[in-house]
Image (cartoon, rainbow, N blue to C red):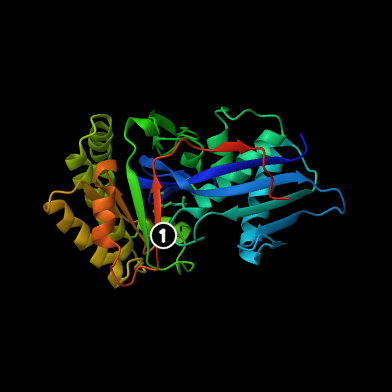
């Protein structure tokens, strides 16, 4: 197969993976649970290079033209390619184009969607099927652990037992089971100052990290049950507690990491108030300042009406639970 194109989604962690047991192989210290998104996706087209002996890595601009990818993105892709080539023993130079449907590097897991898209496209080109159990491992070879969850749709659990080389993520409920909405408040679309990789490295320096790890298994089970039973109150309580705790670990790491901005806190407070007013809504924040506002389909327009005028939000992205990656017939070049 010469030209291959895929789309692969971002995901929002409801129980966060924070801290690694093995940075070399991107293995987490704790199990995590996420909802795969539908609209926030990375597109990737990959083909054999017809001229020259080196890779050509391109980014598709908003106007539709293909330009060389920025140095940092190029580096990340080259490193991931190196791992994929070793795995498949396929060393042909490639032409690769990619683009995201949402802001890159701003805490909306663009690395999860981008690297899972690259892994999937490469694997398909090498004759693997979309259902191969190896895909999550290939995605996380990029160094982005959350990419391992993005190859699967719906509600996903990544067991992540320290010391075990590969416990692949699994879907425990499809998106249609509970098509929750995710209104993403983009507070700052710029690149975050501190990468999640650095956050993982520093996590264990927080004096509260060990206590977090002991509480997580029970919290994860509570949330999983809440999703299976469509119990929004338990989901809201668990998801908000979890987000605050992950950021508390970051804020008490040495050195401290602050991802939140004043507007982030303002949105979290407004969402709690809306819930007290009777709406089924809650919030979570990944490694960045942007807020994911989760709500049920019946309350999504009331929630947006209440929040849309909030000063300080650069952009609202409307998303919801999605089915996972797709192979595409339309190519980026
Ligand atoms: O996948 P990484 O290495 O970028 O780390 C993801 C970290 C969080 O988004 C904060 C949590 C998670 O589980 O996705």
Report whether 141 appears left or right of 228.
right
Direction right: furthest residue: 51
Q: Closer to the camera, 274 or 123?
A: 274
Q: Closer to the camera, 148 or 109?
A: 109
Residue drawn at x 72%, y 33% as measured from the top left: 126
Identify whether 161 is placed above or below 117.
Answer: above
Residue drawn at x 45%, y 61% as measured from the top left: 198
How many numbered circles does the render carry? 1
Instruction: Please state the horizontal and vertical placement of residue 129, each as a whole percent of the image.
Output: 63, 28
Report whether 104 appears left or right of 176.
right
Instruction: Please state the horizontal and vertical placement of residue 12, each as a whole percent of the image.
Output: 39, 48
Query: Residue 245, can we see it?
Result: no
| Neighbourhood count class around disc 1 (C-alpha, 10 Å): few under 14, some 14–19, many 20 upward | many
Q: Quadrant of the N terminus?
A: top right
Q: Closer to the camera, 1 or 82?
A: 1
Q: Which residue is mark 1?
A: 199
Report whether 216 appears left or right of 68.
left
Instruction: Please state the horizontal and vertical placement of residue 320, each as a whole percent of the image.
Output: 38, 44
Query: Residue 37, can we see it?
Result: yes
Identify whether 332 is placed above or below 267.
Answer: above
Report whether 74 appears left or right of 3.
left
Mark 1 within 8 Å of ligand 1, using the beta carbon: yes
Name the quadrant containing residue 133: top right
Instruction: Please state the horizontal and vertical placement of residue 261, each as a whole percent of the image.
Output: 32, 70
- Disc 1 is placed on an element classified as helix
């Amino acid at each position: 197969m010469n030209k291959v194109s895929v789309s692969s989604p971002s995901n929002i962690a409801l129980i966060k993976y924070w801290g690694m047991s093995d940075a070399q192989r991107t293995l987490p210290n704790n199990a995590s649970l996420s909802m795969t998104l539908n609209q926030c996706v990375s597109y990737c087209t990959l083909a054999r290079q017809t001229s020259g002996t080196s890779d050509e890595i391109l980014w598709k601009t908003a106007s539709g033209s293909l330009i060389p990818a920025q140095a940092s993105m190029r580096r990340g892709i080259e490193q991931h390619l190196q791992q994929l080539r070793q795995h498949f023993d396929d060393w042909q130079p490639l032409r690769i184009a990619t683009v995201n449907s949402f802001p890159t590097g701003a805490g909306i897991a663009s690395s999860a969607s981008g690297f899972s898209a690259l892994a999937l496209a490469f694997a398909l080109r090498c004759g693997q099927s979309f259902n191969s159990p190896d895909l999550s491992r290939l995605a996380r070879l990029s160094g982005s652990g959350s990419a391992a969850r993005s190859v699967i749709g719906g509600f996903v659990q990544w067991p992540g037992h320290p010391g075990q080389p590969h416990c692949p993520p699994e879907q425990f409920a499809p998106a249609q089971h509970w098509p929750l909405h995710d209104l993403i408040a983009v507070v700052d679309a710029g690149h975050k100052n501190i990468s999640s990789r650095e956050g993982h490295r520093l996590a264990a320096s927080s004096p509260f990290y060990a206590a977090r790890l002991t509480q997580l298994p029970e919290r994860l089970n509570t949330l999983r049950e809440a999703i299976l039973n469509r119990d929004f109150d338990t989901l809201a309580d668990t998801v908000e507690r979890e987000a605050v705790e992950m950021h508390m670990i970051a804020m008490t790491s040495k050195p401290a990491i602050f991802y939140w901005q004043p507007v982030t806190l303002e949105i979290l407070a407004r969402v709690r108030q809306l819930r007290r007013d009777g709406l089924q809504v809650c919030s979570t924040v990944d490694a960045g300042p942007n807020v994911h506002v989760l709500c049920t389909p019946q309350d999504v327009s009331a929630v947006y009406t209440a929040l849309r005028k909030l000063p300080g939000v650069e952009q609202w992205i409307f998303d919801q639970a999605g089915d996972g990656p797709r192979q595409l017939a339309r190519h980026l070049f």
